[in-house]
Image (cartoon, rainbow, N blue to C red):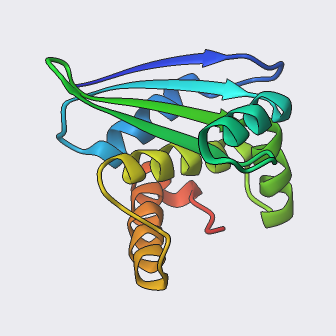
Amino acid sequence: MIDVQTTCGVRGKVPVALLARAARAALGRRRAAVSIAVIGDARMRRLNRDALGHDYSTDVLSFDHGDSPEGRQIELFLCLPFARRQARARGIPPDQELARYVVHGCLHCIGFDDRTHAGHAAMWARQEAVLRRLFGRAYRPA
């Protein structure tokens, strides 16, 4: 079972049910508790600086807090303004871009690593396959 909790710290419509489905699709049959926080640029920049030493806003930050009786403990932070900008640049719906961030973050937490060319290719292929299944005919590649 995958338990997903979503909070929103910015103004705007957030597709809560879609984000939960994206987490479940990415994690498959694993047991997990996933916390998703949708935040703005300023908070994302602070988190990125504090966690990784990068002084800029980014799309998604994922934290794997290990296993507990409920399963893997995953914390995701999604930047809504970043998603809107990327969606506009890619010509895709913002909801699809947010779902991509959830899938991407979850994949990181289950062992995917995109720091090498081969790792990036494998992770991107898996991510996009999950999104194709999730969106069906409505899927638009980035």
Residue at the spot x=52%, y=33% of the render?
A: 76
Between 42 and 106, the one lying in front of the other is 42
**Residue 87 or 68: which is nearer the viewer?**
68
Position of 51 with respect to 125 (left or right) is right
**Nearer to me, 93 or 116:** 116
Q: Position of residue 91 (x, y in %)?
A: 80, 62
**Which image quadrant: the C terminus?**
bottom right
The spot of residue 71 in percent (x, y) is 19, 27
Q: State the image coordinates of residue 70 (x, y, percent, origin top left).
A: 19, 19
88 on left or right of 14: right
- On the picture, is 77 further left or further right than 94? left
Q: Residue furthest left?
A: 69
In the image, what residue occupies the spot 47% across and 79% down?
Answer: 116
At horizontal 40% and vertical 38% (from top left) the residue drawn is 23
In the rendered image of this protein, does residue 38 appear above or below residue 30? Answer: above
Q: Position of residue 109 (x, y in %)?
A: 36, 46
Quarter that holds the N terminus: top left
